Amino acid sequence: MDKRIRFGTKEESNAERERAFLALTPSERFYWFLNSFEGRVPSDPDAAEKKGNFIVRKKNALR
């Protein structure tokens, strides 16, 4: 995705982001989805496991 600063309406910005995302191949979209979690840390890392949720983790993740 383009990281340059642009000025426009929210609708224009969302439309541009959608066009850029849909231009990706299905595998690129999947990798974009996985990378979108980079840097996010859950407030209670064990809460998802307690609920029995499906969890995807990176190989080099600490947990």
Image (tube, grey):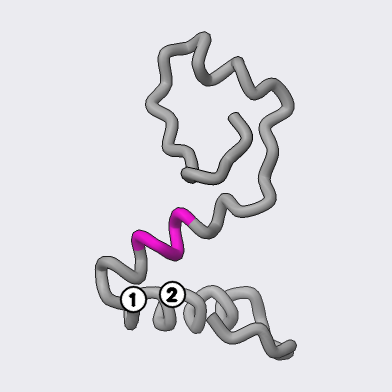
| Residue type (three-letter) at the residue carrying disc 1 | Leu
Which residue range is magenta in the image? Answer: 30-34
Whether pointer 1 and pointer 2 mark residues with C-beta atoms closer than 8 Å, the reply is yes
Q: Per the image, is 62 magenta? A: no
Residue position marked by numbered label 1 in the rendering: 22
Image coords of residue 18 (percent x, y): 43, 74
* Left or right, 59 with reference to 61: left
Q: Quick one: 16 or 30, which is closer to the camera?
A: 30
* Left or right, 17 with reference to 19: right
* Left or right, 13 with reference to 23: right
Image coords of residue 37 (percent x, y): 57, 50
Q: Per the image, is 31 magenta? A: yes
Residue 32, numbered circle: none
Pointer 2: residues within 10 angstroms few (<14), some, or many (20+)? Answer: few
* Left or right, 19 with reference to 37: left
Q: Is residue 26 above or below residue 58?
A: below
Quadrant assignment, res 27: bottom left
Query: Residue sitting at 42 percent across and 13 percent down?
Result: 52
Q: Secondary structure at mark 2?
A: helix
Magenta span: chief secondary structure: helix
Image coords of residue 10 (percent x, y): 64, 74
Q: Secondary structure at mark 1?
A: helix
Query: Residue sitting at 43 percent across and 82 percent down?
Result: 20
Query: Residue sitting at 47 percent across and 39 percent down?
Result: 57
Residue position marked by numbered label 2 in the rendering: 18
Query: Residue sitting at 73 percent across and 27 percent down?
Result: 43
